[in-house]
Amino acid sequence: ADISIDMVRRTREDARRNLKGLVCADADRLPFADAFFDVVNVRGALHHVSPVDPALKEMRRVLRPGGLVIISEPCDDFILVRKMRELMYNRMDYFDEDEKTFLSADLISALQRTGFRVRSHKRFGFLAYALLGYPDIIPQLEFMSRLPFSGVLSRALIAIDKLLARTPIVKNWSLVFFVAAERA
């Protein structure tokens, strides 16, 4: 589900084959019955929703008891990342004025406040995410996927990211926060 019909239309054909259906819907009013899903997966969408609590309550509503919400969101725990994002958001028409990313503690608090029990969370996304994850926003990064050794480069950057995610202090500098929470 996405509120933007353009985003629903852009869903890659290979993804469409694996989905039972695509729906244009507001996160605050999902067109599904109560306790309909075992899992709700949200990838980089909550920072587009303001306020976030009604959307989380709606996700909770459509989850069966014990169902999981799995969320990955841009993370602003590290001041340098936060300032770089502010600069990017202010200079690009791609982002709305009211968009804001989360501090990991704020996202966990919002989940708990709306009836979820956090089961796990971790940070990820350093070099690979920065250099490979934004070609739709920063077209200059598109060249990375056309390099003759792009697959090797991608795997190497991901391996470095995994190492950084386990490194004390540095792991708190991640660009993304992942959280899995259970409907309480």
Image (cartoon, rainbow, N blue to C red):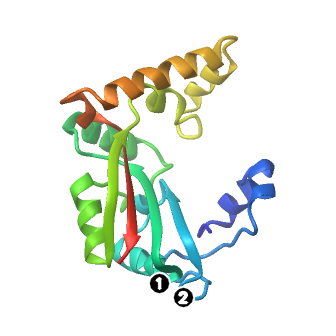
Residue 72 or residue 49, whichever sits in front: 72
**Which one is earlier in the sequence, the residue at label 2 or at label 1?**
2
| Residue 105 visible at all | yes
The reply to whether dot 2 and dot 1 touch (C-beta < 8 Å) is: yes
* Among the 4 quarters of the image, the one containing residue 48: bottom left
Q: Image check: 17 left or right of 103? A: right
143 w.r.t. 98: above or below: above
Left or right: residue 97 versus residue 23 is left
Q: Residue 133 location, x and y as percent? A: 52, 35
**Quarter where residue 85 is shown:** top left
For badge 2, the amino acid type reads Asp
Residue beneath the point at 46% across and 33% down: 129
| Mark 1, other Cα within 10 Å: few <14 / some 14–19 / many ≥20 | some
How many numbered marks appear? 2
Residue at the disc numbered 1: 61
Q: Amino acid at mark 1?
A: Arg
Residue 51 seen in the figure: no
- Under tag 2, what secondary structure? loop
Q: Position of residue 35 (x, y in %)?
A: 54, 84
Q: Secondary structure at mark 1?
A: helix
Would you place residue 53 above or below residue 84 in this image? below
**In 3D space, how far apart are the residues under numbered discs 2 and 1 (Cα atoms)?**
5 Å
Tell me the quadrant of the picture where the C terminus can be found.
bottom left
Q: Nearer the viewer, residue 119 or 74?
A: 119
Task: Find disc 2 in the rendering and name its residue.
Answer: 34
**What is the quadrant of the N terminus in the image?**
bottom right
Crowding near pointer 2: few (<14 within 10 Å), some, many (20+)? Answer: some
